[in-house]
Amino acid sequence: MPIFLDTGNIKEIEKYLKMGIIRGVTTNPTILLKEGVTGGMRGVRARSIEIARLIGPLPLSVEVTTNDPLQMRSQAQELAALAPNINVKITIHGPNGELQNLEVIHELEEQRNIRVNATAMMSAQQCLLAAMAGATYVSLFGGRVANMGYNPCEEITRLRKVLDNFNLKAKIIIGSTREVLNIIEWLGAGAHFVTVVPNLLEGMIVHPYSKETVRQFLNDAAKIETQMEVEHLFPTEKRNGNKAGVIITPSKEKLVIREHKAQV
Ligand code: E4P
């Protein structure tokens, strides 16, 4: 079940949901802002309910909008209560390295039965600790890791090995997709999910050579159609009877059946 959609755009979600190729949606405050969400938590709640209902029971990840420990807990409770398929995103630490986020993750999972997607992580060791704190999902930002000059595939493989070796329940989500190649590579390296931005999902589907091939098939299908039309109007045996005539094909092509003697 490898593909999540990384967007807050309802139209994009509907499009790919209909195709049956996504298994969930992830958002973050930057994504929601880009999709026109305003009004603070009220706006986040409204869009989250809309998406959660649209994709239910598939999982939706929604991020808290604060790093205050008490507010993170109350927002998490609020978001999780909006719909059964919502899991709450909590960053691995605060903007200045504040460490209480792991405590919040642990408490939400173990005491409040709220599924957490631990996020904004760049290394296997961060993900391992979030998994040990009880997170349901651990999100590694593949594109940002690559941006720093590290190979995300190595981090993913190391992480998957450790999680499997210690039977930790956490599922690995790789986010921050930058190119189509990322998706198959990161899944091959051991990710459980890759959350893909819509334009890259389209890039996975549409191949220039497939376009050319389909065009060729359609052109030849039209010729078959024409051929059938000729056959229908002038069956071979009839033509062999040397009847002549002019017919207009479905593609408005003029076809002249010339009289000729069958070479027997
Ligand atoms: C996913 O959960 C992440 O929030 C998202 O993929 C981050 O992507 P970015 O690095 O493009 O902001």
Image (tube, grey):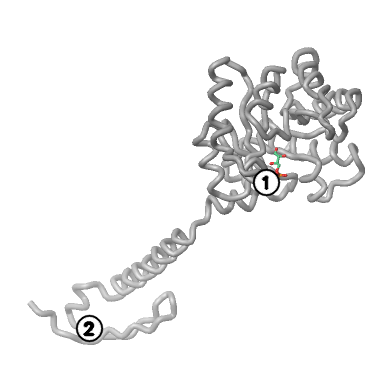
Please tell me in which quarter of the rendered image ligand 1 is found.
top right
Q: Quadrant of the C terminus?
A: bottom left
Q: Identify the residue at horizontal 53%, vertical 51% (top origin).
A: 205
Who comes first in sequence, dot 1 or dot 2?
1
> Up-down: is 161 above or below 144?
above
Side of 144 where 159 appears, left or right: left
Q: Does 194 sit above or below residue 219?
A: above
Residue depicted at x 73% and y 23%: 115
Residue situated furthest top in the rendering? 111
The mark found on residue 243 in the picture is: 2
| Residue type at tag 2 | Lys
Q: Nearer the viewer, residue 125 or 184?
A: 125
Identified at 10% across, 80% down, the residue is 263
**Can the viewer see residue 17?**
no
Who is closer to the viewer here, 222 or 50? 50
Question: Could you tell me residue 219's position as x and y percent?
Answer: 40, 69
Per the image, label 2 sits on a secondary structure element best described as: loop
Instruction: Estimate the spatial distance between the alpha carbons at disc 1 and disc 2, rounded to whole Å.
Output: 56 Å
Q: Quadrant of residue 119?
A: top right
Q: Position of residue 236 (x, y in %)?
A: 21, 73
Question: Can you tell which quarter of the image residue 234 is in?
Answer: bottom left
Task: Identify which residue is drawn at 62% across, 46% down.
Answer: 16
User: Is residue 153 something that shows in the picture?
Assistant: yes
- Circle 1 or circle 2, nearest the eye: 1
Q: Which mark is residue 197?
A: none
Give the image location of residue 5, x and y in percent: 65, 42
Asked whether 155 or 171 is in front, the reply is 155
Which quadrant holds residue 132? top right
Mark 1 belongs to which amino acid?
Answer: Glu
- What label sits on residue 14 in the rendered view? 1
Image quadrant for the N terminus?
top right
